[in-house]
Image (spheres, rainbow, N blue to C red):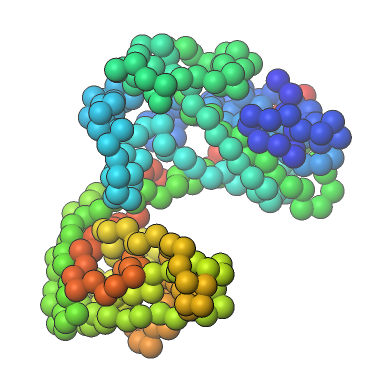
Amino acid sequence: MDVYHDNNIWGKGSPETKLTALPVNHSFLWGEQEILIPAVYVGKAGAALDVCAKIPIEDMAAFLKKWDYERRMSLKTPEEFEQIDADNPGSREFAVEICLDDTPLALRMSSSLRWYPENVIQMGNEPASEDGFENNKSAEEWMGAYGCDRGCCWYFERLSYNWDGEPILFPQKISLAFQANLISITAGHFFTGVSCNGKTVKTAHPLTGQEYTLTLHSCEQIRNSFTEIGAKGVVYPECCQILSYSIAPEIDRSLFCIRDCAEGDHPRMGDAQRQPGGSNGPTAVFMAGKNAAPDKRMAVSSLHFEPVSEVQWRMVFQIKPKNDAEISFPIKA
């Protein structure tokens, strides 16, 4: 299998970036999941690491029973998409830091794909549909190149790295640090109007059961004006609510947030003379920077053309599905 530094898991790169394979065929258990490192690839342009993560058929079958075809095709809200990702054993993505001969490399990009046995494809495609499960050519290439067990499902990931110095073309040792990506899990909902001073809301961590109390300090209805943002002739939604709150006991801000359950209004074509607003992303970032009370947390609702009298919020924890793992092993010539 040809591997290139300048392309992802599916494509073919330029000849000068083609890498040389160093077979390692090292497997280990990360928690309860079997991980295979079939090879590392090196060249003057950089390096690449291929990772094969085994997914038991029974895990995928349980997921497809819970999320049958009809339910998967009816997903609408961000919360529903987060729920299916949290339950899907094929969505357990991760990051990998690599050192060759104790020299760290800088991640350039990563790409992934999945492979399913025929009986799982049939379960995922009931009723038969063009939108169901299938194995593409690249997944089949990985299965053949690395001799993966066809009685299991597989998650394949290729990570490309840049050298941070001179290329290491004949490494003797490889060290890897695996970090599972965080999963968003909603742990309750509540409503606010334009006044919520002192109101408290209870929630609990989905895994540990640790109880938390939110104190809502203020909820303000505002209209934004972003005159320098937006395409000419397009009218953007400008109205939102700003919620100020605190949480006890404290939890890292990266591991908990409050999100609006509703999606915002979409921009629309309008009078070119009207003042344009901002899109959802830049508006949220801009408003977050206006927090006048650093000891408080803020949540920004979705943007609408007209003020919304009531917002339904959801409390979201960021969950790490498994502990980090570090391994080192020699690369045999």
Quarter of the C terminus within the rendering: top right
Q: Is residue 325 visible?
A: no
Quarter of the N terminus within the rendering: top right
**Residue drawn 25% across and 32% down?**
71
**Residue drawn 16% across and 67% down?**
191
Q: How many marks?
A: 0
**Residue drawn 40% across and 63% down?**
254
- Residue 154 location (% of width, % of height): 47, 24
- Residue 157 location (% of width, % of height): 56, 33
Q: Is residue 307 visible?
A: yes
Q: Please indicate whether residue 291 sits to the left or right of residue 61 in the image.
A: right
Q: Is residue 288 above or below residue 85?
A: below
**Residue drawn 27% across and 80% down?**
221
Q: Quadrant of residue 172?
A: top right
Q: Quadrant of residue 40?
A: top right
Q: Please indicate whether residue 51 sits to the left or right of residue 250 in the image.
A: right
- Residue 39 location (% of width, % of height): 66, 27
- Residue 72 location (% of width, % of height): 30, 33
Q: Is residue 66 above or below residue 230?
A: above
